[in-house]
Image (cartoon, rainbow, N blue to C red):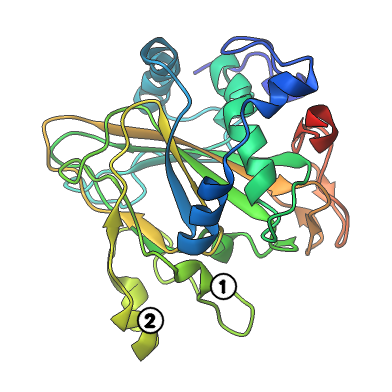
Amino acid sequence: MTEDLDWSTVQQDTGLFIQKPTQATDWRKFKLAQTQIDQYFRNGFLAPIKVLNDEECDLLLEDYKKFIESDGHPYFYEFHKNQTGDSNNVLMHALGHWRITRAFHDLIYHPAICVPSSQLISGDNVECSVRFWHDQLFAKPAKYGGCVAWHQDYSYWTRTYPMKHLTIHIALDDQTEENGCIHYIPGSHRWNRDGKPLPVTDFNFKNMESIKTILTKDEKQKFFPTPCKLKRGEVSFHHPLAVHGSYPNRSDQPRRAAVVNYIADGVGSSVDGCLLEGTNIMSKGEKLGGQFYPLVYDQKWAN
């Protein structure tokens, strides 16, 4: 793919999916009910929430197909045509596509994911303003799609603090148990090691059960995977410590998903340097913001 406009320089939604609300009452229409919020904090995830229609999914998939067929792009933070390295278990995984196409750029500003995120992200049921952290693509081709091994997202993100993060998993195809839908371990968002996330046991995602080598006896006894069978256009929200993963795709249909990761406004860097490949250099303690970590929702907009 050829280098074109860097969409990270466009610090607002362009209205491709939905016009940005202008009134507080319009923003509030996207808020979750208290029962949904309670479910999230009880289980560590919430699903399904309908966000996109079929036409909007098709629009995103047009760009998605170009990525799958390419060998990357200069604006990707990471691009793995097959992260497992096994041709019988293919997992395409990429970060940074919001910088490359208008559709994926506008997705990060979608009110139907930004507004609920403000209710869930702080961890204490208090609304806050939301910034974009980074996005991901996970594609499993039909018949030989690979797994995504069990993990906690914050295990990969300890270079940022405090832990006020949220992941939104967006199904662009119907997700079934046969094609490798996302699975969660309810209550696992309470699992940690002295306040720290579980260690990463497989950086290439291919050893599905490797996490069990570091679980306690009590955690193993509570390890009951729950499938999250999303329809295309539906999303799940999950906690940064929610243990999740997905099994291989052996069906006749592809399983493609887009992921948006958010942080609460005020989250900072715990290291000196670039947090994502090709982005600006940051100092330890510096708050994330600017071109690569835009504000996607200000809690004042709904009040």
- Earlier sequence position, callout 1 versus callout 2: 1
According to the picture, the residue beneath numbered tag 1 turns out to be 197
State which quarter of the image contains the C terminus. Answer: top right
Front residue of 214/77: it is 214
**Disc 1 residue crowd, few under 14, some 14–19, many 20+, Cα 10 Å:** many
Q: Amino acid at mark 1?
A: Pro
Residue type for callout 2: Glu
Q: Secondary structure at mark 1?
A: loop
Image coordinates for residue 276, horizontal then vertical, percent? 67, 47
Residue 296 lies in what quarter of the image? top right
Locate residue 20, reporting x and y percent: 71, 15
State the residue in front, 278 or 161. 161
Q: Nearer the viewer, mark 1 or mark 2?
A: 2
Query: What residue is shown at x 40% (from left), y 25% (from top)?
Result: 233
Whether tag 1 and tag 2 are in contact, CB under 8 A, the answer is: no
Q: Position of residue 283 (x, y in %)?
A: 87, 57
When the figure is inspected, residue 115 is found, relative to residue 275, above or below; the finding is above
Q: Residue at x 33, y 27 (%)?
A: 232
> Residue at horizontal 71%, vertical 24%?
27
- Name the residue tied to disc 2: 219
Q: Quadrant of residue 269?
A: bottom right
Whole-angstrom CA distance, mark 1 to mark 2, is: 14 Å
Report the front residue among 260 and 75.
Answer: 260
Q: Is 8 above or below relative to 103?
A: below
